[in-house]
Image (spheres, rainbow, N blue to C red):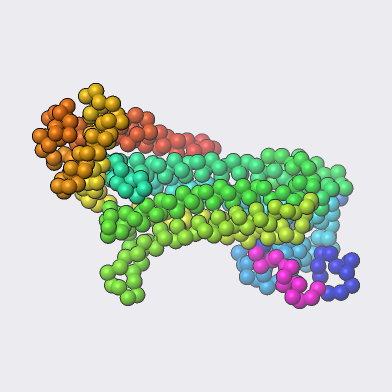
């Protein structure tokens, strides 16, 4: 029987019941619903609604319900309950140690503030898990950076070879992106960590609930400030999805880089067979499936964020049933982000780098043309003029099929007589790398320093998480 059946004399149409019921997805809130119910039992005991022994019976029964049903989502769904809240309440009333006493638990509480609390608890748990997974992905990037600290690859703009960089510099670029993602997830968690329970349906509870104590019992920082806002607010879901979506975008960019690097045209990287597949037709294929799936999941995660924003954009205060549509996209997005973050370290740990091919590619494509322009600047040539002269040297090399460093000095001097024998030392790849040792640059010493800073920040983050 529905929790709201007293007002109605007719049973729900079977089609409407299937349309209306949310247990098929909100069963995932079972743990949080029980957690919130245990705290609510303590709150209404303090308010004089329950006796101490009644609260104890309810709490014991709720713990047993979680133990019995927590790992069996299929049986929960088969129960036919309208939602997870109805399911827990029905199980509580059926419990032999509780019976009709279970009907007292919902005193002063609405499903509106109940689901808002459950969802905040769930989001908080999931954000903690995503942060841990994200830190593990960062650790894998740091391990790659340390392993390949002397590996030089071409850097690209417009997907054209631009200037040589260290592979470690590339890895640390993604470390920085994920670090910003971690900050956003942590910030979203902070704003999610407020307790709506006690807000009732929209106007607040009529019972003398100590909402500050209730918030503390559930590990929230504080109660929410406005009951209308509390039951209808899904900003914390939108914000969490926004942070998840941007993190997924960064993972997709990383995946795209590696997909290119594993192709025959680049062949910088070979992926482990643990994260690749073959072809049903072409025996030679080794497909970067893990990376392609990471890249593909971003659409669903972005879609979840867009879907929820569209759902809530025109809702009047306070609660509306439209908000039932918040959970499926949230659950799906968090599941997919989790899979992406967890598979990435497996991909990175198993990669083999063809360092010789990377170096040859870095030397090609006239990526030292900027170094030639800088050389001319050191001889007193204004940069804009030096840029044009270096471009002429590139054009000469292209016409002959020669790299800049292979052009005869006499021919370079025809472009500008200020070019001397020392130019070859200045445009050597190693020399160009050595010059870029300012903070944030790709010089070896700069990258070693950046790696040390990143490892220190990672260690500090792990320490804060563990309470060290």
Residue 326 in which image quadrant: bottom right
Report the front residue among 167 and 192. Answer: 167
- Residue 85 lies, in percent from the top left, at 74, 61
Task: Indicate the position of residue 266 as horizontal and vertical percent values.
Answer: 28, 55
The residue located at (51%, 44%) in the rendering is 181
Residue 377 included in the magenta stretch of the image: no
Question: Residue at coordinates 29% horizontally, 46% vertically from top-left?
Answer: 161
Region in magenta: 12-25
Task: Please say if 395 is above or below 6.
Answer: above
| Residue positioned 74% across, 42% down in the render | 224
Note whether residue 217 is visible. no
How many numbered marks are there?
A: 0
Horizontal side of residue 250 vs 156, given as left or right = right
State whether residue 255 is above or below residue 153: below
Picture quarter containing residue 10? Answer: bottom right
Q: In this view, does 134 lie to the left or right of 58?
A: left
Q: Would you say residue 332 is visible in this rendering? A: yes
The quadrant of the picture occupied by the N terminus is bottom right
Q: Where is residue 8 in the image (x, y as percent from the top left)?
A: 88, 69
Name the side, left or right, on which 313 lies relative to 52.
Answer: left
Residue 452 at x, y = what percent?
Answer: 37, 34
Q: Which residue is drawn at 48% across and 48% down?
A: 134
**Viewer-closest of 409 and 389:** 389
Residue 216 position (above or below residue 6): above
Q: Does 23 appear in magenta?
A: yes
Q: Is the magenta stretch mostly helix, strand or loop?
A: helix
């Amino acid at each position: 029987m529905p929790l709201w059946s007293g007002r109605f004399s007719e049973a729900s149409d079977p089609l409407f019941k299937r349309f209306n019921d949310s247990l098929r997805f909100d069963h995932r809130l079972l743990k949080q619903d029980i957690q919130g119910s245990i705290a609510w039992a303590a709150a209404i005991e303090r308010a004089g609604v329950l006796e101490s022994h009644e609260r104890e019976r309810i709490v014991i029964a709720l713990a047993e319900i979680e133990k019995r049903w927590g790992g069996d989502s299929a049986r929960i769904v088969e129960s036919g309950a309208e939602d997870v809240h109805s399911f827990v309440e029905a199980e509580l009333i059926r419990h032999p140690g509780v019976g009709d006493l279970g009907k007292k638990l919902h005193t002063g509480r609405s499903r509106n503030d109940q689901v808002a609390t459950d969802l905040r608890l769930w989001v908080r748990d999931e954000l903690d898990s995503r942060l841990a997974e994200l830190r593990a992905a960062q650790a894998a990037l740091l391990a790659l950076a340390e392993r390949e600290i002397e590996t030089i690859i071409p850097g690209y703009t417009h997907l054209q070879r631009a200037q040589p960089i260290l592979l470690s510099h590339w890895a640390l670029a993604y470390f920085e992106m994920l670090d910003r993602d971690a900050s956003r997830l942590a910030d979203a968690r902070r704003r999610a960590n407020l307790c709506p329970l006690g807000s009732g349906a929209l106007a607040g509870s009529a019972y003398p609930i100590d909402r500050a104590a209730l918030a503390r019992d559930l590990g929230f920082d504080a109660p929410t400030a406005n009951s209308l806002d509390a039951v209808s607010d899904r900003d914390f879901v939108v914000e969490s999805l926004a942070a998840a979506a941007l993190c997924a975008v960064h993972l997709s960019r990383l995946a795209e880089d590696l997909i290119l690097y594993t192709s025959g045209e680049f062949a910088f990287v070979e992926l482990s067979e643990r994260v690749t597949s073959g072809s049903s037709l072409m025996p030679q294929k080794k497909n970067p499936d893990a990376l392609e799936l990471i890249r593909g999941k971003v659409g669903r995660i972005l879609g979840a964020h867009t879907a929820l924003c569209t759902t809530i954009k025109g809702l009047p205060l306070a609660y509306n049933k439209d908000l039932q549509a918040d959970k499926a996209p949230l659950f799906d997005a968090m599941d997919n982000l989790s899979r992406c973050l967890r598979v990435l370290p497996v991909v990175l740990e198993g990669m083999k780098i063809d360092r010789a091919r990377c170096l040859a590619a870095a030397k090609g494509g006239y990526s030292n043309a900027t170094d030639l322009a800088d050389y001319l600047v050191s001889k007193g040539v204004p940069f804009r003029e030096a840029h044009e002269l270096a471009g002429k040297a590139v054009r000469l090399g292209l016409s002959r099929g020669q790299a800049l460093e292979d052009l005869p000095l006499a021919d370079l001097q025809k472009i500008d007589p200020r070019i001397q024998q020392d130019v070859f030392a200045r445009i050597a790849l190693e020399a160009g790398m050595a010059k870029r040792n300012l903070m944030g640059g790709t010089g070896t010493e700069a990258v070693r320093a950046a790696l040390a800073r990143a490892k220190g920040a990672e260690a500090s983050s792990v320490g804060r998480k563990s309470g060290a």
